[in-house]
Amino acid sequence: MLKIKNLHARVEEKQILNGINLEVKPGEVHAIMGPNGSGKSTLASVLAGREDFEVTEGTIEFLGKNLLEMEPEDRAREGVFLAFQYPVEIPGVSTVNFMKTALNKIREYRGQDTLDAVSFLTLMKEKIKLVEIDQALLNRSLNEGFSGGEKKRNEIFQMAMLEPKLAILDETDSGLDIDALRIVANGVNKLKTKDNATIVVTHYQRLLEYIVPDYVHVLYKGRIVKSGSKELALELEEKGYDWIKSEVEVA
Amino acid sequence: MSTITDKENFSTTLIDSLLSLHHSNDKDARSVAQEELKKWGLPTAKSEEYKFTPITRILAKNFSAEELLVEPSASKIKIEDTLLSEFPENVVVFSNGRFDESQSSLKSMKGLTIIPLKQAIEQKSEVIEAHFKSFPRSKDPFGLLNAACWQDGLFVHVEKNIAVSSPLVVINQHDAGTAKVSSHSRLLVLIEQGADFSVIEKTVTTGNQPVFHSLNEEIKVLANASFKYYKIQNDPGDLIQVSNTTIYQENSSRTDTYTFSLDGKLIRNNLSILIDGEGCESHFFGLYLTKGETLVDNHTVVDHMKPNSFSNELYKGLMDEKSKGVFNGKIYVRPHAQKTNAFQSNRNILLSDTATINTKPQLEIWADDVKCSHGCTTGQLDEEALFYLQSRGIPKSTAKAMLLYAFAGEVLEAIKDERLREYIDGMISERLHKNF
């Protein structure tokens, strides 16, 4: 589904990614871990098409298409979804209207009929249950005045509505208490099928107790320096990142 | 150097020609204004109040001094605006500055008088004398010019406890298809104790010749009365317009003003709210969406003259292409106007590198027990928000329209009349290419 080869990227003059290689297949869950500043969020942003980052080398193929040539909206329409680390507050745009516009733009792109108000609301009610989000919240301005947990839940609600093929969760656990974490993780798990894939970007192992990865990759200085099974996450939790750092330095 | 001389000549010739005009009505007030104008002249590049708005230069470029004072020929253009079908009850049309009876329709109602000002001066001189003789007049040079040479106007009198449910629509129509137009109109409104009244005012300009329109408005809102004022400026072509609107409020009265400026060549709105009473509320909203080379200048004044009143001001602007925005918001709180609450906010977004905004809050507070705040911001479209919307599959152009519409929406939502909100919404949506 996703093939990243030798990806190099920088922001302004600062080189952040230094040759990432990663392949994700349908049905898989990959965790990307690593210390602060290792390039985790940059990788997530480059996948979603954030303009601040310049790809200097390498390729990203998504479902056989060159992802790097696509505008952010086209990536979303092809099935990429980024759950933001810091969801943006947009006064004056309600989540409901925003989602209706987004969903219909995606449906148009895929040659499907747009949803009328009634079928949209039916779909929305179904998805609301999945992520346990208060409907009143969705009628308010997007993320404006939401708590950290409400913002993250809203991200998962959007994910549920848009049904992406590849979901990238960027530090979704940051700022969440244990209950919110559980709800968010449950939502993600319920959305999992054999045809879609998930990349979980996280600093801590905590989230991975709820969203169990098939693979764990450790990112350090813009490179994947270690890959393994979910046990690698436990090892990191126990030992911290220093042993990885020293292993890399020695090599 | 020649342009400076031209401008000086323009100002002098204009004032000289003004003095030679002989109007038969309102003689005293006209001559007072003439004398004042003679003393101050038209604003120059050095005039603080017109620092960013070179109106004299632009007038001199488009008109000779005589052309500014000449009565324009009548217009026969029929106005087609859905505003008239939405609010057909009370409509007054001025065509090229003259009261246009054929296009006006006034439903008679007990306790409500709406008549041409010249007629009112003859028939209702006592009321006008009692309420407007000592009215705090605008000292703005164009306010003086208007006071000296106004051609036609309207007088509205709403008697005690009369609530007029349908708003009065005033259309200032200019037909500049064949010749330049210069018109000077006036509006006098008296809303007595406990009465309720609204005005929707719109300019409708056709043709490509330059148009100059000066408008003086004096509105008196007596105790416990309520007044709503909507101004809609959306004229393609070369309209240069200066409005001087002064609203005077007495005890426990309320005003809500809304100013929408979407198009025109040069628009200057001087809006002054004089709160000469306790327990008053004044809300004023503005939205200016400019493009091309349009200049929109809003100068507002709130003068808290008595204790225990509340004012709240929100003006927002989106400037695109080479357009310019100017905002100046003065809040005065006089020494004995304790317990005043006065808030002001001006927010701007520049959509191009060549658009500009000059914004200046000016608070002068002499009382010590007050709550006042002001804030002005100028920025660009929020790239992070744009990316967020795009990342959900929304094309950039739609995402941009959504953000701009949401920005304007805050002012739009403040309009309580649903029909009017929809009408203005339609205009704004069209302008912002709303496609979602």
Image (cartoon, coloured by chain):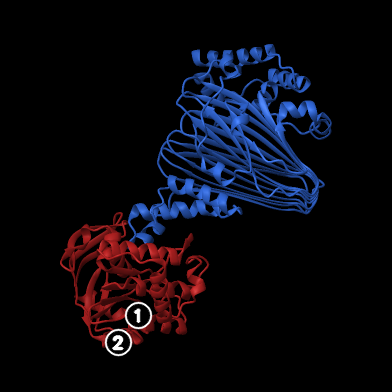
Q: How busy is the neighbourhood of tag 2: few (under 14 within 10 Å), some, or many (20 plus)?
A: few
Q: Are marks 2 and 1 on the same chain?
A: yes
| Amino acid identity at mark 2 | Glu
Taking B55 as reference, is A177 above or below it?
A: below
Give the residue at x 43% y 63%. A97
Q: Looking at the picture, does residue B249 appear above or below residue A85?
A: above
Which corner quadrant of the image does residue B107 belong to? top right
Residue B277 image offset from top left, x and y in percent: 80, 47
- Percent from the top left, x then y, of residue B364? 71, 43
**SS label for mark 1:** helix
Q: CA distance from mark 2 to mark 1?
A: 24 Å
Question: What's the residue type where badge 1 is placed?
Answer: Val
Name the residue rendered at 36%, 63% in the picture.
A102
The one nearer the camera, B49 or B223, is B223
Residue underneath mark 2: A235
According to the image, label 1 marks what residue?
A188
Q: Which mark is residue B154?
A: none
Q: Would residue A227 be seen by someone viewing this image from the given angle?
A: yes
> Residue A236's spot in the image, x, y percent?
31, 83
Left or right position of A34 against B247: left
Nearer the N terminus, badge 2 or badge 1?
A: 1
* Chain identifier for the red-coloured part of the image: A
Output the letter for the chain in blue. B
Q: Residues within 10 Å of mark 1 (few under 14, many from 20)?
A: many
